Image (tube, helix red, strand yellow):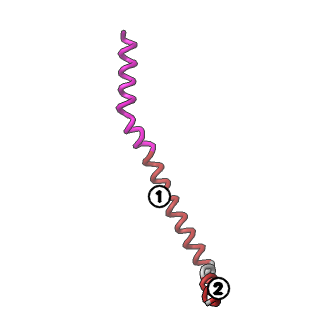
Amino acid sequence: MTVMIRCIAILGCVLLLQGCITKIVTVPVKVAYKTTKGVVKGTAAVVGAVIPDGDDDDAKDQNKKD
């Protein structure tokens, strides 16, 4: 009988703590995502600054066609 009570208690704890486990897992993932997103945006800005005429070529082609 005590084994049955222990199993029910463990099952109850697992069900009640699902929200906590989800929070523990998702918070670091969100932090990593936001950090990576910022690094990628910064890298794109640096590449855009190093290659200054990269975006202007399309605009020049459009002006020549008009």
Quarter of the rendering occupied by the N terminus? top left
Q: Read off the residue under disc 2.
A: 61
Quarter of the rendering occupied by the C terminus? bottom right
Q: Secondary structure at mark 2?
A: helix
Q: Are marks 1 and 2 in contact (CB under 8 Å)?
A: no
- Residue 10 lies in the magenta stretch: yes
User: In the figure, 2 relative to 27: above or below?
Assistant: above
**Magenta span of residues:** 1-25
Residue farthest toward the top in the current orientation of the protein: 1
Q: What residue is at 58 percent from the left and 78 percent from the top?
A: 49
- Kindly identify which numbered label has been placed on residue 10: none
Q: Read off the residue under disc 1.
A: 34
Residue 8, image x, y percentages? 37, 20
Circle 2: residue type: Asp
Q: What residue is at 40 percent from the left and 13 percent from the top?
A: 3
Which quadrant of the figure has residue 2? top left
Exactly how many numbered labels are in the figure? 2
Nearest to N terminus: mark 1 or mark 2: 1
Label 2: few (<14), some (14–19) or many (≥20) C-alpha neighbours in 10 Å = few
Which secondary structure dominates the residues rendered in magenta? helix
Q: What residue is at 35 percent from the left and 15 percent from the top?
A: 5
Residue 19, image x, y percentages? 37, 38
Q: What residue is at 46 percent from the left and 48 percent from the top?
A: 28
Tell me if 63 is positioned left or right of 12 in this view.
right
Which quadrant of the figure has residue 50? bottom right
Residue farthest toward the front in the current orientation of the protein: 66
Circle 1: residue type: Lys
User: In the figure, 9 relative to 60: above or below?
Assistant: above
- Residue 51 lies in the magenta stretch: no
